[in-house]
Image (spheres, grey):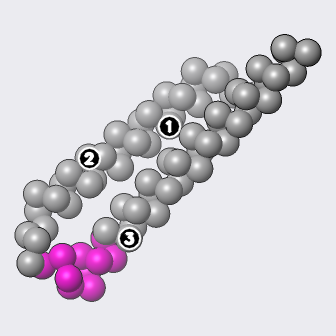
Amino acid sequence: MVPRSAELKLIQKLQKRVLKRTQSYDTSVPEQLRVTEDAKDEAMEISRKQGKVEGLTRKLANKINKEQQASDR
């Protein structure tokens, strides 16, 4: 079992990585070039990675909620 703090740190690190990539995309790809297939592919990849972070966050939140409910009984 992985300590909760390690899980949170991993999620935070992943989120920071997605943020950095998003910021890089925003500054390096001009608005008028965002309609190209390469730009769209990159945006979709960033979106997919953000979705993974969201999924991990929800999974951890559900786990915490279940543990809290079990301890309240």
* Residue at the extreme right of the image, as rendered: 73
Q: Is residue 47 above or below residue 3?
A: below
Q: Quadrant of the N terminus?
A: top right
Q: Which residue is mark 1?
A: 11
Q: Which mark is residue 44?
A: 3
Compare marks 2 and 3 and give the one earlier in the sequence: 2
Left or right, residue 47 beside residue 73:
left
Determine the image quadrant of residue 73.
Answer: top right
- The secondary structure type at the circle numbered 3 is helix
**In magenta segment, residue 37:** yes
Q: Is residue 35 above or below residue 15?
A: below
Q: Which mark is residue 25?
A: none
Disc 2 or disc 3, which is closer to the eye?
3
Q: Amino acid at mark 3?
A: Met
Cα–Cα gap, marks 2 and 3:
15 Å
Nearest the eye: 68 or 15 = 68
Compare marks 3 and 1 and give the one earlier in the sequence: 1
Q: Are marks 3 and 1 in contact (CB under 8 Å)?
A: no
Which portion, as a residue range, is magenta?
33-42
Q: Which residue is mark 2?
A: 20
Q: Residue at x 29, y 77 (%)?
A: 40
Nearest the eye: 3 or 26 = 26
Give the class, few, some or many, for how many residues have Cα within 10 Å of label 1's Cα (few <14, many ≥20): some
Q: Is residue 54 above or below residue 36?
A: above
- The secondary structure type at the circle numbered 2 is helix
